[in-house]
Image (cartoon, rainbow, N blue to C red):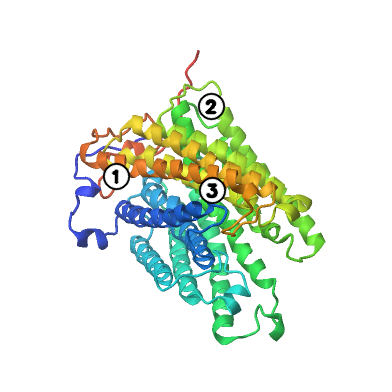
Amino acid sequence: MNAPVTNEANYLAAGDTLRSWLLTQDHKRIAVLYMLTITAFFFLGGAAAAVIRATLANPAGTLVSHDTYNKLFTAHGVIMVWLFLIPSIPSVLGNFLIPLMIGARDLAFPRLNLASWYVFVAGGVLTLASLIAGGVDTGWTFYTPLSTMFSNGHVILVLAGVFVAGISSVMTGINFIVTVHTLRAPGLGWFRLPLFVWAIYATSLILVLATPILAMTLLLVAAERLLHVGIFDPAVGGDPLLFQHLFWFYSHPAVYIMVLPAMGVVSEIIPCFAHRPVFGYRFMAYAILAIAAIGFLVWGHHMFVSGQSVYAGIVFSLLSFLVAIPSAIKVFNWTATLYKGSIRFDAPMLYALGFVGLFTIGGLTGLFLASLALDVHLTDTYFVVAHFHYIMVGGAVTAYMGGLHFWWPKMSGRMYPEMWGRVAAVMIFAGFNLTFFPQFLLGVQGMPRRYHTYPAKFELLNVLSSAGAVVLAIGYLLPLVYLAWSLLYGKRAESNPWSATGLEWQTDSPPVPHNFDTQPSVSEPPYAYRVQQP
């Protein structure tokens, strides 16, 4: 690979006024704007989770009322899913890295990129306005008829917020798809692309194809709530299961909107810190596309106890087992990449290995829920809560943290304190397991989700879960502190501090505004690490 390094002012120094940031068309600056925005949402959603766990530390649930508790878990879910998890890796790391990884000067549509951030902020403001005005008690899934007929919360306002945030996702997805198709450097064929680019490309396809379904569904909920038309209400000719089919047709692919980018991040980190090429690169790329495609076919496993056809349930169960195959291919190939590697356990690698372990647990427990007979017992229990969080938090958030540490020297031009990075990674892994593994046991024992009181026999496991949440919260706060510290006092980063492959490591740290002075070219396969002979 050939990409000249320049001595020109970096993108952070190319204008230091507020106007220069708010009107920027530089993909790297827009990534920073996204990072600051979603970080605020992350800690806001985390604060709601902290109150939830504090309430559940006592079987009587006396800390907050049942109505406030319902609004808390709704706020937590809405903020974390639509205002943090879905935009996190694509909008931050994807925005920053895709042009650098493919040798482009920017995304295909820089103005659209900036507009997507403003639209996302507008969606976030609408959502927060609904919470400030009194909140919503429907849960993040907005199930009918609660959301259309019975809820007294500000349902329309939060639906509008999620709707607008979805528009931002579509704008971002279109930009990535066009960029990957049209702006690749000479020599950078499809099977020379980094797996992170493959993952963001597949995620963008899901965003563009699935998000309009969510938008239409939310509009239908608003129409029934405001106009009392018969869409979901059977009393006036509606179908009570239609909402669930429409919602989950988007929302299960949305799981892969969150997980596929995480897989892409881990596929960059593991080869670098094992100093070995990715095992089975083509199979890894095909597995990404297979997960994205099959993800559209499994939404019905959320509806095994809804009254849908038994035959439909059997088909959805089989398809849910099928999607585990490409996921397993990725886990096995990451493991094979580590085999006989010269492994360094720096903070990004600890996060990546934590992702592999937590995602594996989340995936295996998903097979329990894909089994018709088991799901009858486990649905709407804490088993589902634990499974979901092992995939979303243990998977997506852990990988986001790993990617943030891995590319922090490139983004900021500074090195973070490695020891504190390792401490935080270990704390997050330990705190996460202490928080959510007891919830598997609670679910098997029959404790339902979304209740703020529970029988005394469940107290011990709930106290353990709440104690783990304290450890987890400290683990998440630590990077906020030391990464901010590194901006002022961190050691200046070299252009390639990890000795990694890829075009993004051939530029300055931080990069110049236009990324490359001359068009880079690619002449070797990805992950061309030289295997060290014993």
Above/below status of 322 relative to 491:
below
- 127 or 508: nearer the viewer: 127
Above or below 262: residue 417: above
Q: Nearest the camera: 150 or 505?
A: 150
- Kind of element beneath mark 2: helix
Query: Is the Cβ of the residue at disc 2 closer than 8 Å to that at disc 3?
Result: no
Which comes before the other along the chain, label 2 or label 3? 3
Sort mark 3 into few (<14), some (14-19) or many (20+) by Cα contacts within 10 Å.
Answer: many
Percent coordinates x, y for residue 358 in the rendering: 56, 39
Circle 2 sits on which residue?
A: 338
Checking the image for residue 516, the label placed there is 1
Asked if 182 appears above or below 306 in the picture, the reply is above
Percent position of residue 101, x then y:
40, 43
The answer to whether mark 1 and mark 3 are in CB contact below 8 A is no
- Locate residue 209, reporting x and y percent: 56, 63
Label 1 to label 3, Cα distance in Å? Answer: 28 Å
Residue 9: x %, y % from top left: 19, 45
Q: Amino acid at mark 2?
A: Leu
Q: Measuring 18% from the left and 54% from the top, which residue is drawn there?
A: 15
Kind of residue at disc 3: Leu
Q: Residues within 10 Å of mark 2 (few under 14, many from 20)?
A: many
Residue drawn 63% across the image and 63% down it: 249
Which secondary structure lies at badge 3?
Answer: helix
Examine the rendered structure and indicate whether residue 181 appears above or below residue 158: above
Q: Are marks 1 and 2 in contact (CB under 8 Å)?
A: no
Q: Is residue 179 visible?
A: no
Q: Nearer the viewer, mark 1 or mark 2?
A: 2
Labelled disc at residue 260 = 3
Specify the farthest residue to the top: 534
